[in-house]
Amino acid sequence: MGVPSQSLEGVVEHKLDTKYRVSVPSAWRPASGQTVQLRLLKWKHLKVPVLRAMTQEAFEAVIESIASNAEVAPGVRNAQKQAVYAGSESVTLNDQGKLAVPKKTAQAHGLEAGESVHLFGRGAAFDLVAPKDVEELREKEAKILEDLYDSVDFG
C-alpha cells in the first residue's frame, strides 16, 4: 500500500512528541491496521530546507529523473543520485498516523521534541518544515501564487 490515493493537501501544525514522532492529518493516514514505508529526503523547496516524505515509488521517480537528464554529464548524474541516496532514509508511517522522524535528522533541521513542526501537503508527498523556516516558505509560495493568478484562466 502507498500513501492514500487522495491528494495530500494543506498546511497543518503539529508537535513532535518525545520520541520525535509527528501525527499526520487523518486524510493522509494509511488504512487501519496498515503501515506505509516512506522515504524521508533532506531537500530544499524554493531554497528553504525541508524534510520531504514520499513513497518509494515517488523516490524512484526522482532517481529516474536524475538518471535520464541528458543535459547533465553522466558522471555528474551519478554523483547527484549518490547525494540524493545519502540524503534520504526509510521511515514508517503507522496506522495511527504517526511518522517517526530520526532524532539526528530532526535536530539537524531545527526540529525538537515537544515543539512545533509544520506539514505542507505536496500532492503525492509532504514536507516537514521547522518553525524558523515557515514564514520564509509561505512568503515564497505566496509570490509564486501571485504570479500564477495572472496566468491561469478558469473561464
Image (spheres, rainbow, N blue to C red):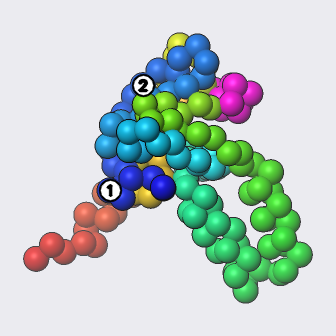
Q: Is residue 27 left or right of residue 68?
A: left
Segment colored magenta: 102-110
* Furthest residue toward left: 155
Instruction: Kindly identify the residue that appears in the image at 56 percent across and 63 percent down.
Output: 58
Q: Does the segment drawn in magenta span residue 154? A: no
Callout 1 environment at 10 Å: few (<14), some (14 to 19), or many (20+)? Answer: few
Instruction: Kindly identify the residue that appears in the image at 39 percent across and 53 percent down.
Output: 4
Above-or-below relation of 142 to 19 = below
Identify residue for label 2.
14
* Furthest residue toward front: 33
Q: Looking at numbered disc 2 in the image, what kind of residue is underneath it?
A: His
Q: Which element is circle 1 on? A: loop
Q: Position of residue 24 (x, y in %)?
A: 42, 35
Above-or-below relation of 83 to 154 = above
Q: Position of residue 57 (x, y in %)?
A: 57, 64
N-term mark: 2 or 1:
1
Between residue 55 and residue 69, name the one nearer to us: 55
> What mark, if any, has residue 6 been given in the picture?
1
Residue 151 picture quarter: bottom left
Instruction: Kindly identify the residue that appears in the image at 70 percent across and 81 percent down.
Output: 69
Q: Which element is circle 2 on? A: strand
Work out whether residue 61 can be spotted. yes
Which quadrant: the C terminus? bottom left
Q: Position of residue 130 (x, y in %)?
A: 55, 30
- Tell me the chief SS of the magenta region: helix
Q: Looking at numbered disc 1 in the image, what kind of residue is underneath it?
A: Gln
Q: Is residue 153 left or right of residue 140?
A: left
Residue 124 picture quarter: bottom left
Q: Is residue 125 left or right of residue 91?
A: left
